[in-house]
Image (cartoon, coloured by chain):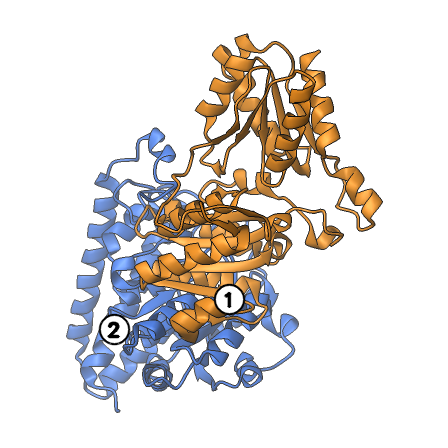
């Protein structure tokens, strides 16, 4: 199959959906040039750096029958416009009694590892998991990027796409032809029988590296990528843990109150799965600190292959 | 274009409907038939009425926490509004929104908003939609003097200006953000002066004079329809009641000031004009009032007779299909 980068997969998804539906519009502080060339400056509109205004404008566009895609760039820039995300976009479908649909895709880049320091590095998944009304996708491969983004654009709700900064130029297989990926269906990245590792975003790749290494030591690791956090494929996670009896969750967000905690809860609160657990779930996350700038410190706080391997061994004790 | 007598009479009826609706809502709130909070629009009726009289059904508006007047002026149904205040299943939001979140997308009312200044970006999006559609639709957004110190005000005026959007920013300057005087919060005498910073017309109008609001709004709406871009319309007005009906909000404004503004009642002054200029008789105006009161009574009966939502309805409708 053809290989393209994560970034190219996103561009292709947009191009296909913009061709498919002329109600799609794009807002971003810098133009995606190819998209703008094909669809014009009106539909692919450059905005000043006014996050509250353009995050909110997308809501007005959606409420008026359009399907906006907004590229916010860094996830940290969302915080400038939190009212529009949380009080407006997330709540209005419910609050207005379902009178109107708000199909909006907000794209943000997440993660750390590039020495961008605290205000340009964050993985704020769990903050939004706690706000009903926004769906959350978290593609980890070019294939998923294209398929999930296309589904997001067709969805009739606000969707937040968490796209990992480190994956932009990573290549992977993605068919040229039309396909979409349904929300709420986890991907089984690797089959295994001893431990289930649920990993998010770039950590999927870290977990796979760890799994390959552990295989040499005779440990069989299953790796699950939820692909969407809202909705979350609880059934696949529970089914896997029921087989392996052990759970490790890998997420580069801070540990406290994170997505990893939610995933662990999904497993332990289900009595059938709980009975099958042979050891306590283990979380591999960043410690509760802002992301530091200097490479040795940044490398220290982010989960890596060694920490994942250690966690798997801990679960196996 | 001079105002036709019929337009004035229609506006009189709309203002009176808002007044009677708000009087009744305050009473039902006091009697605990309406939970939560209600922000009364009494005293400001001429603004919503004068602006919306220039709008078509397919134009879109965005409103505020003090939004009943905007809903009524845009043509929302009194029964479904009152039912929403009562928290009933038949309300506009099926009881999920209440007073601060009434919307009626079928008449272009894109929602009241409980967050000060939050409606402006949404209205900018509605105006961008109108521009992309290529017709002559416009958007109008209502907000108070308090919203003008929010970042969203400045960001939204800026976006609307650079994109030449068909939108009218309607500032209802009622002089206070809860109990803090606008003259404390705002260094310029007229908020409309801020329009200059965004290269759009800024117009000040007596917000208690329905005809003046109608004419001033008419000019900027016409310009927006013609593709000439946005405008900021500042309507100087006053709310008669405390910030919200709840006693939790103290009334700290001077009594004399409140009384002075009451003597400039927008409805009474239009009534005088209609009578003095022979556009209506006292009997005709009294008949309008009776009709309006009957509609409000009908709305209350509808709300009272409407079923409560089932408790578990709370779990429905977080996402659209």
Residue B39 visible here: no
Instruction: From the rendered image, report the letter of the chain displayed in blue.
Output: B
**Callout 2 secondary element:** loop
Residue B56 numbered mark, or none: 2
Residue appearing at x 56%, y 84% in the figure: B193
Q: Residues within 10 Å of mark 1 (few under 14, many from 20)?
A: some
Vertical placement of residue B98 versus B307, above or below: below
Chain on which label 1 sits? A
State whether discs 1 and 2 lie on one chain.
no
- The color chain A is rendered in: orange
The percent coordinates of residue B20 (x first, y second) are: 30, 60
Q: Residues within 10 Å of mark 2 (few under 14, many from 20)?
A: some
**Front in this rendered view, residue A118 or B119:** A118
Q: Where is the C terminus of chain B found, in terms of image quarters?
A: top left
Indicate which label's residue lies in the foreground, 1 or 2.
Answer: 1
Q: Is residue B118 left or right of residue A97?
A: right
Residue A173 visible here: yes
Determine the residue located farthest toward the bottom in the rendered image: B1
Vertical placement of residue A103 versus B34, above or below: below
Determine the residue located farthest toward the front in the rendered image: A1
The percent coordinates of residue A262 (x first, y second) are: 57, 29
């Amino acid at each position: 199959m053809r290989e393209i980068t994560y970034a190219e997969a996103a561009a292709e998804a947009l191009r296909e959906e913009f061709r498919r539906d002329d109600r799609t519009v794009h807002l971003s502080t810098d133009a995606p040039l190819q998209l703008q060339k094909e669809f014009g400056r009106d539909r692919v509109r450059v905005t000043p750096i006014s996050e509250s205004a353009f995050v909110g404008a997308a809501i007005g566009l959606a409420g008026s029958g359009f399907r906006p895609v907004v590229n916010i760039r860094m996830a940290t820039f969302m915080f400038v416009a939190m009212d529009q995300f949380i009080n407006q976009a997330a709540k209005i479908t419910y609050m207005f009694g379902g009178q109107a649909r708000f199909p909006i895709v907000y794209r943000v880049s997440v993660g750390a590892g590039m020495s961008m320091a605290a205000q340009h590095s964050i993985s704020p998944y769990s903050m939004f998991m706690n706000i009903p009304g926004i769906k959350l996708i978290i593609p980890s491969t070019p294939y998923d990027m294209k398929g999930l983004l296309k589904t997001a654009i067709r969805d009739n709700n606000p969707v937040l796409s968490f796209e990992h900064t480190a994956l932009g130029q990573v290549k992977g297989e993605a068919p040229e032809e039309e396909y979409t990926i349904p929300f709420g269906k986890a991907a089984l990245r690797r089959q295994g029988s001893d431990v289930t590792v649920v990993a998010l975003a770039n950590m999927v790749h870290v977990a796979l590296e760890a799994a390959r290494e552990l295989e040499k030591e005779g440990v069989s690791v299953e790796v699950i990528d939820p692909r969407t956090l809202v909705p979350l494929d609880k059934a696949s996670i529970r089914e896997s843990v029921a087989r392996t009896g052990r759970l490790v969750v890998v997420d580069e967000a801070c540990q406290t109150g994170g997505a990893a905690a939610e995933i662990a809860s999904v497993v332990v609160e289900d009595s059938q799965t709980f009975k099958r657990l042979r050891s306590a779930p283990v979380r591999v996350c960043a410690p509760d600190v802002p992301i530091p700038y200097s490479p040795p410190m940044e490398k220290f706080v982010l989960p890596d292959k060694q920490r994942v391997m250690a966690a798997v061994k801990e679960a196996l004790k | 274009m001079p105002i036709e007598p019929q337009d004035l009479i229609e506006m009189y009826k709309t203002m009176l409907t808002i007044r009677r609706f708000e009087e009744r809502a305050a009473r039902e709130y006091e009697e605990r038939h309406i939970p939560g909070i209600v922000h009364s629009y009494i005293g400001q009726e001429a603004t919503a009425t004068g602006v919306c009289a220039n709008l078509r059904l397919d134009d879109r508006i965005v409103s505020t926490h003090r939004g009943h007047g905007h809903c009524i002026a845009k043509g929302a149904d009194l029964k479904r509004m009152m039912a929403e205040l009562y928290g009933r299943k038949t309300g506009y939001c099926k009881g999920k929104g209440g007073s601060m979140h009434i919307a009626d997308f079928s008449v272009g009312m894109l929602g009241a908003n409980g967050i000060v200044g939050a409606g402006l970006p949404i209205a900018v999006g509605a105006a961008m939609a109108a521009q992309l559609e290529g017709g002559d639709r416009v958007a109008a957004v209502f907000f108070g003097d308090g919203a003008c110190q929010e970042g969203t005000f400045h960001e939204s005026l800026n976006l609307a200006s650079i994109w030449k959007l068909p939108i009218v920013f309607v500032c209802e300057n009622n002089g206070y953000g809860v109990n803090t005087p606008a003259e404390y919060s705002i260094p310029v005498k007229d908020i409309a002066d801020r329009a200059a910073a965004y290269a759009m017309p800024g117009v000040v109008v007596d917000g208690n004079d329905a005809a003046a609001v109608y004419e001033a709004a008419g000019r900027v709406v016409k310009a927006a329809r013609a593709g000439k871009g946005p405008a900021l319309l500042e309507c100087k007005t006053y709310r008669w009641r405390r910030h919200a009906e709840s006693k939790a909000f103290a009334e700290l404004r001077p009594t004399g000031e409140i009384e002075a503004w009451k003597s400039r009642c927008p409805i009474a002054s239009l009534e005088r004009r209609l009578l003095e200029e022979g556009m209506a008789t006292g009997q005709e105006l009294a008949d309008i009032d009776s009709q309006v009161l009957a509609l409000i009574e009908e709305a209350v009966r509808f709300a009272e007779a409407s079923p409560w939502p089932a408790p578990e309805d709370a779990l429905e409708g977080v996402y659209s299909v």
